[in-house]
Amino acid sequence: MRCSTPFVTFPVIVVNGNIPDQLQRKLHKLKTLIAHSIATLEHADNLITKIGESIKQISESHNDLDRLCSEAGLKGQKAIRAAENFTWNLRWLLKSQLSVVSKSQDEAQDIITQVFDTGGVLGILSSRGTACSRRKYSRVVHNPSTDSPL
């Protein structure tokens, strides 16, 4: 495992030699998971910003809805309800999407962190990968030559 570039802290799986088909399928699934996580992390900030701006614009243009409702032939209480329902539903939908994107971003970051942590614990990170992750790993596996028995 190593970082893909010196500036980005995303893991890359490198296999040297032949491996069984079943293990190769599992590695392919892991690579796909990592690729999806990277894509999520690369696009999530932009999506969160755009959704936040949309929510702000909806709140600001709420007064224009009254005019649009009256132009559409709605009057009185029907116009007020239509404008409020439209604004409420759209804001609720966008806030829900904002929450989903934020949670997806957090989960993708957790996946990438777990891959680096696992690689560090197993000792399979390249020196560049260890430097990229900027993490110190603790050995959690028992080593009989250096660890004392209870």
Image (tube, helix red, strand yellow):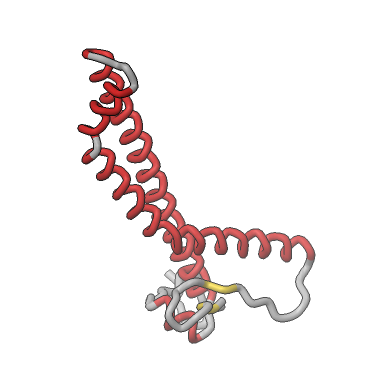
Q: Quadrant of the N terminus?
A: bottom right
- Which residue appears at 30% of the width and 24% of the height? 71
Give the quadrant of residue 56. top left
Q: In the figure, is residue 106 to the left or right of 112?
A: left
Q: Position of residue 73 (x, y in %)?
A: 32, 17
All told, the count of numbered labels is 0
Whether residue 144 is visible to the viewer of this picture, yes or no, is no
Give the quadrant of residue 99. top left
- Which residue appears at 25% of the width and 14% of the height? 75
Is the residue 105 above or below the residue 77 in the image? Answer: below
Give the quadrant of residue 93. top left
Extreme-bottom residue of the structure:
127
Q: Which residue is more in the foreground, 12 or 120? A: 12
- Which residue appears at 46% of the width and 83% of the height? 6
Q: In the figure, is residue 15 to the left or right of 132?
A: right
Q: Which residue is more in the foreground, 150 or 97? A: 97
Q: Position of residue 4 (x, y in %)?
A: 53, 78
Q: Which residue is more in the foreground, 19 or 46? A: 46
Is the residue 38 above or below the residue 103 in the image? Answer: below
Q: In the figure, is residue 106 to the left or right of 120?
A: left
Q: Quadrant of the C terminus?
A: bottom left
Is the residue 11 above or below the residue 41 in the image? Answer: below
Whether residue 101 is visible to the viewer of this picture, yes or no, is yes
Q: Which residue is more in the foreground, 80 or 106? A: 80
Q: Position of residue 49 (x, y in %)?
A: 33, 55
Q: Position of residue 67 (x, y in %)?
A: 24, 28
Q: In the figure, is residue 63 to the left or right of 82?
A: left
